Image (tube, rainbow, N blue to C red):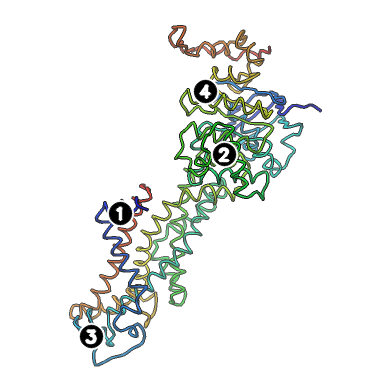
Amino acid sequence: MKRTVRIILANPLSVIGVILIGLVVGSAILADFITPFPTHRGTVVDFTNFNQPPGWPNIMGTDLVGRDLFTRIIYAYRISLILGIVVLLLAVPLGVTVGLMAGYLGPRVRFVLMRTTEVFLSIPPLVLAMSIMGVLEPTLINGMMAVTVMWWPWYSRLVYNLTLAEREEGYVLAAEVIGASRFHIMFVEILPNCFPAILTKMTLDLGFVILIASSLSFLGLGVQPPTPDLGSMVAEGARYLPDSWWLTVFPGLAILVAVFGFNLLGDAMREVLGTHQ
Amino acid sequence: MNDLTLEIIDLSLSFKGLMETTKVLHDVSLTIGQKEKVALVGESGSGKSVTARLVLGLLQAQNKTRVSGTINFEGRDLAWMTARERRQLRGTRMSMIFQDPVSALNPVYRIENQFHEVLKRKRPTVSLDEAREESTAILGDVNITEPERVLKSFPFQLSGGMNQRVMIAMGLINEPTLLIADEPGTALDVTVQDQTLRLMHDMVEERGTSVFFISHNLGVVREFSDRLYVIYQGRIVEEGKTEDVFANPKHPYTRALLAAVPSITSGDTISDVINDTSAFLAPREVH
């Protein structure tokens, strides 16, 4: 623990990452208490106060129906984080299992699993997610599914490569020799040795999942109004540039802060866990 | 019925490539009696380790290998056992000690958990506390003075020699009848290697474990084993009691092997590399 703190403090960028993510996650959790107008996350209309530039009490201005932009951005963070975490919770176990099996179970299993993985990897991620969302109803749940489908192959690739290296280690042979089952060797012996790399990638990915989800909703394929979402806020505001600049700039900055923060945090994790590729 | 712990009869192995098959073992036959320590000596690539893996039943399942011949373990033919039965034997009736003790222990688990895992092979219901107790006892046997600290440690927190002793303890804790030692301690420095081998020698004497000792180090073999087999390019070229073979090597390859041992006392320089190896394919010599 002390070592972790020391490594993070030694690198100013890591400190910035931790602070940014602390702010993002903290504000998303405490959104009900720190936002000035918590009801504005829903279908509130206040035409006396619409499209106001930043000022007081709306520090980031108001949108086209008079809702406080700051409030909506914080609630959008909450949605984005939930989406990111759910996507990773689905994609990581799936990808990790596929990668372990492909790396350990022999050539036939490897052929089937890795070729399947490559089919998914060969389609540009956003296109894949867009085509899925085009078929399905654009809801939060379907958005999560679409992003999950494009995300797991990266984990199976990562874990596959790690497994190939780990299976040559003596402890794997030792486990085979004492008669451990293949399931035991994959999940109990090899997997824990892959954790540092997986955790690092997960931290880095949380930012990218948020970015992709925002891209989808920017195109109108993600979360639907009135649920606040950074991507759809940017899309909506883009029609009123450059006069109502705050409608796009603040949600855009919010995306930047989250993605940038998770990237810096990922780099910090890499240093702490010692997973330099 | 015989009382041999391990009996290998005419064992051949080939690996199937794309075009041709490569034969790695040619009719290898050897026996290990109860409480006997038998060494298999040869250079790298001569088929030593492959033989050990066949005994453990690790190569048979692969579809690139062709195996013929018989391996009897305690009078039962391994080929007639199911994969499950073979798996049942490993870790309980036979176990193995490795070249590099540090990498053979999983770096993410404490030693006590790894002992627990090994003990569970024999008694699936054993608790961590019981495992701790038993491992403390056996760690004492391998001259580890602070078993509590070692059990709480991760493998990378211990020295190579310490890890080697932990490996020996782990290999013997389930009281196997056959211990396969694949070049144990080659990754360690010589004094530690010597020390741990002596320890292993005493442990197996005490427990009456048969040992199948695989090595390229003649000095170690001379000290450790009762009988030895010399293997060259997948063929057994000489066999006999250790002292007989050392006193009177009959096969050209054995002689070359013995001559190749560098000595600090005799003042010789390192012997020349032998380019003409045709004599090494001469038929097997038995003492």
Chain assignment, label 2: A
B157 and A84: which one is in front?
B157
Dot 4 alpha-carbon crowd within 10 angstroms: few under 14, some 14 to 19, many 20 or more: some
Question: Label 1 sits on what residue type?
Answer: Ile
Secondary structure beneath dot 2 equals: helix
The answer to which image quadrant residue B24 occupies is: top right
Mark earlier in primary sequence (2, 3): 3
Mark nearest the camera among 2 and 3 is 2
Mark nearest the camera among 1 and 2 is 1
Mark nearest the camera among 4 and 3 is 4
Secondary structure beneath dot 4 equals: helix
Secondary structure beneath dot 3 equals: loop
Chain assignment, label 4: B
Q: Which mark is residue A8?
A: 1
Q: Is residue A3 left or right of residue B35?
A: left
Question: Label 3 sits on what residue type?
Answer: Asn
Between the C-alphas of marks 4 and 1, the distance is 45 Å
- Residue denoted by label 3: A51
- Where residue B95 sits in the image (x, y, percent)? 63, 35
Mark nearest the camera among 4 and 2 is 4
Q: Which mark is residue B194?
A: 4
- Residue denoted by label 2: A174
Q: Residue at x 63, y 15 (%)?
A: B242
